[in-house]
Image: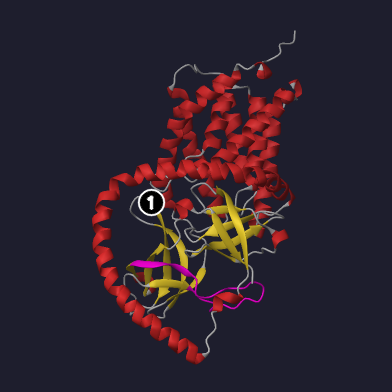
């Protein structure tokens, strides 16, 4: 103890140097999957599962309190929306019938049947305010690999960026460093979805870049994933809902448009997810 | 040895609470960093050798959960534990403003170290927005929480397991 006290400055400096080297090495590989993270997350994961579930309830209370103020105006808005949606529902039914008949004629198969899912629990959030990372409790042992898509039944959550033996880190579509090839379902235009800091209140949202200047996209269009990029090492499923278009912005320097998306998944309460492995 | 086992368990507990609960409660898109506040409060009260050791293993666990890089949090925690440990012997600590003040300033320092390293790693960031908005909000939240954490650390500072044994 006395020795430590006398030599503390030296030890601190040596440690700083060592960890700077670690940072350099891992930054170069762009992956944090060494032996130490593997062991530590493997130990922590089982306990963390229960704490996360408990935290979910606390988070829900907090979410409820903060949403009371907007509940009244939202109620009025929703009532008018219900009316317009009921009209649309009639239209939808006729289209659905038509669609089913046409599908039968074409011998179309439901594409979702040949996907393979691995169920997982979200056990934590990481990356502080800088990244938007969820930690889930499946890993290499369950057949999860980097680049695979993570979904809930509402839509796309994100992509696996790192895996250890029994945990994985998921970069969500709210993160500024994610790239997901996407297509606007109505206009049929392709683009890349990344996360963004929206200008009001620093709330994170998703953004679809590289739309053409004369884009036909409108508010309310749905963005889905597309397998326009072929990569043999991972399976990229098409047709998973990412979100709806809220507004369009002009990216003047690049002569293109971008669409601000409202994600289909509610990221404040995501708990059970699926990893698409094949 | 018993002492460090105790401190180790508390650190793990705080990291888990942070990543399972506090990381998800975000006000205006920003959440507070309980682990960081804990390191500062701990270094303000306990001696610097202990603080650096706690900062070391807390940082390693935190870094295991961090995406992309290994070692950044540990580096920041060790530096700050040493710095605070160095200053705290020379100041009057009974004011309740001390932990808040330290946390506010040090959250900014942490933010700039992050920006510095992410810039070197050529990660894409909107630096202006982070410096003006998110770090400021995080600093405010952290300094409010630091008052509670400081009192908590003071409380377990008086436990028998952490008593200093004087040698003559």
In what quadrant of the picture does the C terminus of chain A appear?
bottom right
Q: A29 and A204: which one is in front?
A: A204
Q: Please report the residue visible at 55 percent of the width from the left and 56 percent of the height from the top.
A: A272
Left or right? Give the position of A99 relative to A277.
left
Q: Please report the residue visible at 47 percent of the width from the left and 87 percent of the height from the top.
A: A103
- Residue A35 position within the rendered picture, expressed as x and y whole percent measured from the top left: 74, 50
Q: Please report the residue visible at 41 percent of the width from the left and 42 percent of the height from the top.
A: A62
Left or right? Give the position of A256 relative to A168.
left
Q: A66 and A128: which one is in front?
A: A66
Q: B110 and A125: which one is in front?
A: A125
Q: Was residue A66 drawn as part of the magenta stretch in this picture? A: no
Per the picture, the main secondary structure of the magenta-coloured stretch is loop
- Residue A185 position within the rendered picture, expressed as x and y whole percent measured from the top left: 41, 77
Q: Is residue A92 visible?
A: yes
Badge 1 density bin: few <14, some 14–19, many ≥20, Cα 10 Å: some
Q: Was residue A236 drawn as part of the magenta stretch in this picture? A: yes
- Residue B7 position within the rendered picture, expressed as x and y whole percent measured from the top left: 66, 28
Tag 1 subunit: A
- Residue segment shown in magenta: A225-246
Q: Which quadrant of the figure has residue A64?
A: top left
Q: Which quadrant of the figure has residue A261?
A: bottom left
Q: Secondary structure at mark 1?
A: loop
Q: Is residue A224 above or below residue A146?
A: below
Q: Is residue B51 above or below residue A276?
A: above
Residue extending furthest bottom? A105
The residue pinned by badge 1 equals A202
In what quadrant of the picture does the N terminus of chain A appear?
top right
Q: Is residue A128 above or below residue A228?
A: above
- Residue A210 position within the rendered picture, expressed as x and y whole percent measured from the top left: 42, 73
Q: Which quadrant of the figure has residue A3?
A: top right
Residue extending furthest top? B168
């Amino acid at each position: 103890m006395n020795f430590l006290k006398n030599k503390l400055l030296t030890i601190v400096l040596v440690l700083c140097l060592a960890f700077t080297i670690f940072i350099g090495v891992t930054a170069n590989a762009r992956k944090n999957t060494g032996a130490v993270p593997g062991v530590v997350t493997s130990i922590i994961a089982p306990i963390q599962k229960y704490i996360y579930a408990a935290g979910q309830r606390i988070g829900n209370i907090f979410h409820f309190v903060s949403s009371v103020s907007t509940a009244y105006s939202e109620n009025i808005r929703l009532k008018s929306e219900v009316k317009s949606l009921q009209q649309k529902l009639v239209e939808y039914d006729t289209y659905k019938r038509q669609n089913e008949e046409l599908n039968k004629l074409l011998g179309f198969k439901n594409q979702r049947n040949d996907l393979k899912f691995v169920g997982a629990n979200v056990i934590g959030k990481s990356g502080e305010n800088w990244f938007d990372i969820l930690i889930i409790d499946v890993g290499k042992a369950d057949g999860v690999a980097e680049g695979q898509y993570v979904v809930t039944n509402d839509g796309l959550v994100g992509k696996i960026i790192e895996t250890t033996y029994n945990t994985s880190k998921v970069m969500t579509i709210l993160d500024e460093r994610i790239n997901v090839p996407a297509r606007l379902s109505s206009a049929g235009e392709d683009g890349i979805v990344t996360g963004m800091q929206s200008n009001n209140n620093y709330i994170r949202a998703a953004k679809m870049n590289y739309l053409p200047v004369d884009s036909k996209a409108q508010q309310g269009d749905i963005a889905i994933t597309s397998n326009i990029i072929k990569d043999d090492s991972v399976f990229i499923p098409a047709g998973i809902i990412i979100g709806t278009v809220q507004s369009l912005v002009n990216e003047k320097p690049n002569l293109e448009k971008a669409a601000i998306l409202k994600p289909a998944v509610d990221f404040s309460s995501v708990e059970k997810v699926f990893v698409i492995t094949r | 040895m018993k002492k460090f086992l105790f401190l180790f368990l508390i650190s793990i507990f705080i990291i888990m609470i942070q990543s399972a609960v506090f990381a998800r409660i975000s006000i205006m898109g920003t959440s507070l960093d309980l682990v960081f506040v804990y390191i500062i409060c701990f270094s303000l009260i306990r001696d610097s050798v202990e603080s650096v050791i706690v900062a070391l293993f807390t940082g390693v666990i935190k870094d295991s959960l961090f995406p992309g890089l290994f070692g950044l949090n540990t580096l920041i925690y060790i530096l700050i534990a040493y710095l605070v440990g160095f200053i705290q012997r020379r100041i009057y600590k009974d004011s309740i403003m001390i932990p808040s003040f330290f946390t506010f300033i040090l959250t900014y320092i942490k933010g700039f170290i992050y920006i510095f390293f992410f810039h070197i790693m050529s990660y894409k960031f909107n630096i202006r927005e982070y410096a003006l908005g998110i770090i400021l909000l995080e600093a405010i939240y952290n300094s409010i929480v630091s008052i509670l954490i400081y009192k908590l650390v003071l409380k377990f500072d008086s436990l028998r397991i952490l008593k200093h044994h004087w040698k003559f």
